[in-house]
Amino acid sequence: MNIALIGYRGTGKTTVAQDIALRLGWDWVDSDVEIELQQGKSISAIFESLGESGFRDAESMQIETLTQRDWLVLAAGGGAVLRQTNRDRLRAFGPLVWLTANPATIVARISGDATSAERRPNLTNVGGLTEIEQVLAERTGIYERCADLTVDTEDKTPAAVADEIIRRLGLPPLPHEPSDASDD
């Protein structure tokens, strides 16, 4: 059993993947981080040196490798679903959970991440809210067709999103350790 989280950047994929994995006792991985480790540079630098096509090639290789694992929660890069081969591998890997948020929330989350600007390139010439709206307009249909489950992350904590995913997929979380606190 495995779970793949898909969706636009800033929807919480990495944080929620960690939370789900902790609750289930599984491993987790962020495919973008794995690409950065393998390439020895940030995604922005990869885009700069190899172009988007070169980055997508590296992404496809990581998706191929990562989807061979078991008991894994995979936070896939926002554009991982753009290639049919990746979509096929992710579907065979396990349920695909599409995390969503409205564009204004995504802008706020990305702006609040100090590493985002240096690690993640703009995907269009405009950046910001306009870019997010444009890219979401292009990708929403793909996300919808891929997803086995859609979870809106708006106004929810990552823990609440993780709990919702586990519940809706019918997975048994690890039993919680008894609290040392007394009810007295």
Image: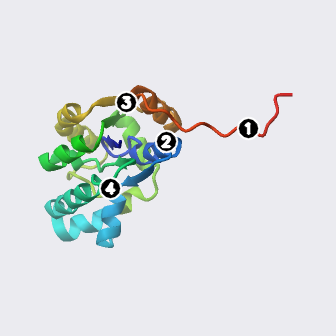
Q: Under tag 2, what secondary structure?
A: helix
If the image is split into quadrants, where does the N terminus sit? top left
Q: CA distance from mark 2 to mark 4?
A: 20 Å
Of residue 45 and residue 89, the one placed in the foreground of this image is 89
Residue 170 located left or right of residue 4 = right
Name the residue located 21 percent from the left edge and 40 percent from the top edge: 134
Q: Point out the residue furthest to the right here.
A: 184
Within-10-Å neighbours for mark 4: few <14, some 14–19, many 20+ = many
Query: Type of residue at label 2?
Result: Leu
Question: Looking at the image, can residue 42 be seen?
Answer: no
Can you identify the residue that label 1 sits on?
A: 179
Can you identify the residue that label 3 sits on?
A: 151
Identify the image quadrant of residue 64.
bottom left
Query: Type of residue at label 3?
Result: Val
Q: CA distance from mark 1 to mark 3?
A: 30 Å
Can you identify the residue that label 2 sits on?
A: 24
Identify the image quadrant of residue 146.
top left
Can you identify the residue that label 4 sits on?
A: 31
Earlier along the polypeptide chain: callout 2 or callout 1?
Answer: 2
The percent coordinates of residue 145 (x first, y second) are 19, 32
The percent coordinates of residue 93 (x first, y second) are 27, 45
Earlier along the polypeptide chain: callout 2 or callout 3?
Answer: 2
Q: Under tag 3, what secondary structure?
A: strand
Q: Are marks 1 and 3 in contact (CB under 8 Å)?
A: no
Q: CA distance from mark 4 to mark 3?
A: 20 Å
Query: Type of residue at label 4?
Result: Ser
Could you say which disc has been placed on residue 32 in the image? none
Earlier along the polypeptide chain: callout 1 or callout 3?
Answer: 3
Of residue 8 and residue 22, the one placed in the foreground of this image is 22
